[in-house]
Amino acid sequence: MGSFIEINDTLQITTEQGFPEELIWEKHLAKQFTAEDFAGSVFEFEKPNMRLYHPAPTPVSLVHNIGGKWLYWGHAHIVEQTIHAETKTTAGKFKIVKVYPPEYMKMRSQIDVDAGKEFTNF
């Protein structure tokens, strides 16, 4: 018997899957967000496939998937996760614990991704 559960160190989600609508690139350029801006906020996500994320206090990379391109925003703590075997989905809750400065976001989103997933719409 094999396992159908993958282990992820990156929470890569679309807006529809639960990426925080508050994190907008243009607003971040005008006035940089910090983790303190989201203190006390808990966000929810749901993704297809069964997976495990590193639980808090280990951070996971927080990535906004925009049309298949990955925009790295910072780090999150997974505070809750549920694997739904019947629907083969994973849902959970996370907190934002680090927001990258724009220049680092640009570099990370172009270098630390698989070919074809580079975010370049800056």
Image (tube, rainbow, N blue to C red):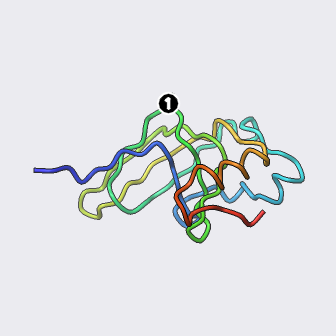
Q: How many marks?
A: 1
Q: Give the residue drawn at x 58%, y 40%.
A: 76
Whether residue 57 is situated above or below residue 5 in the rendered picture? above
Percent position (x, y) of residue 50? 32, 55
Q: Give the residue drawn at x 35%, y 50%.
A: 51
Q: From the viewer's side, name the closer residue of 63 and 105.
A: 105
Percent position (x, y) of residue 3? 20, 49
Q: From the viewer's side, name the closer residue of 41 and 111.
A: 111
> Label 1: which residue?
58
Q: Give the residue drawn at x 76%, y 39%.
A: 34
Which element is circle 1 on? loop
Whether residue 2 is situated above or below residue 26 in the rendered picture? above
Percent position (x, y) of residue 69? 60, 65
Quarter of the image holding residue 59? top right
Q: From the viewer's side, name the closer residue of 5 and 69.
A: 69
Percent position (x, y) of residue 47? 43, 60
Which quadrant is home to the C terminus?
bottom right
Q: Is residue 113 left or right of residue 80?
A: right
Kind of residue at disc 1? Thr
Q: Residue furthest top?
A: 57
Q: Residue furthest bottom?
A: 67
Within-10-Å neighbours for mark 1: few <14, some 14–19, many 20+: few
Q: Residue furthest left?
A: 1
Q: From the viewer's side, name the closer residue of 8 and 113.
A: 113
